[in-house]
């Protein structure tokens, strides 16, 4: 089975994804990291070199490569599911997508703490809130919505997802 974690920047996809992959004993793939490895550049450098268009092209290639694995937990980037052909890759074969959905206030706080340097599409809180709202319909297309409460630990979120998936709730 392939499990995709979707959601806005700062929603916990990488942290929860890693923990979930341990629980499910599946390999973990962080899409942004794969893109960086394949390009030999950081996300920021890719945006500087070719803008969002170049980033999306590399993202789609990395996603196609990730989908070639029959079994993995894959943390997508915040914009992956906003591109229609990517959605088809996400739905291919034995796969489930899980939207990590904390309140925007939590996201904004986290990005503030993690730094915006690595996230060219998070500029100001107002701009990011606007982007978040416009993307909600895309996130809603995920098979499972996992509401995450402020203060909830990533271990708890991963445990809840594992329970859902192992119980056949996915
Ligand atoms: C993006 C989110 C980032 C990264 C890139 C673009 C987006 O991933 O893929 O900066 O469009 O929201 P994270 O969601 O892991 O921060």
Image: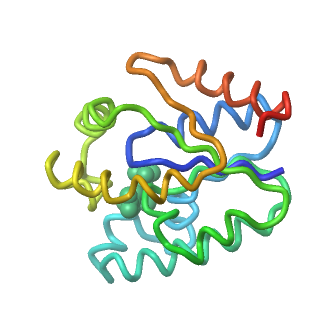
Q: Is residue 92 above or below residue 75?
A: below
The residue under the point 68% across, 73% down is 64
Number of residue marks? 0
Q: Is residue 15 above or below residue 39?
A: above
Quadrant of image for the C terminus: top right
Q: Position of residue 136 (x, y in %)?
A: 40, 52
The residue under the point 37% across, 73% down is 46
Q: Position of residue 160 (x, y in %)?
A: 67, 23
Image quarter where ligand 1 lies? bottom left
Q: Position of residue 41 (x, y in %)?
A: 42, 70
Q: How is the image coloured?
A: rainbow
From the viewer's perspective, tell me whether residue 84 is left or right of residue 45: right
The residue under the point 26% across, 37% down is 108
Q: Quadrant of residue 76?
A: bottom right
From the viewer's perspective, tell me whether residue 110 is left or right of residue 70: left
The residue under the point 23% across, 37% down is 112
């Amino acid at each position: 089975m392939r499990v995709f974690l979707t959601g806005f920047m700062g929603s916990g996809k990488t942290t929860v994804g890693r923990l979930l992959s341990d629980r499910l004993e599946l390999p973990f793939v962080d899409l942004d990291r794969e893109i960086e490895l394949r390009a030999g550049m950081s996300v920021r450098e890719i945006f500087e070199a070719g803008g969002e268009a170049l980033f999306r092209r590399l993202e789609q290639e990395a996603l196609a490569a990730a989908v070639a694995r029959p079994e993995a937990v894959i943390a997508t980037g915040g914009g992956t599911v906003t591109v229609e052909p990517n959605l088809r890759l996400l739905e291919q074969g034995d796969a489930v997508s899980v939207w990590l959905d904390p309140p925007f206030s939590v996201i904004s706080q986290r990005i503030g703490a993690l730094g915006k340097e690595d996230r060219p599409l998070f500029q100001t809180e107002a701009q990011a809130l606007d982007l978040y709202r416009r993307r909600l319909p895309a996130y809603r297309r995920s098979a499972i919505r996992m509401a995450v409460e402020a203060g909830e630990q990533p271990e708890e979120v991963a445990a809840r997802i594992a329970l859902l998936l192992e119980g056949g709730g996915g």
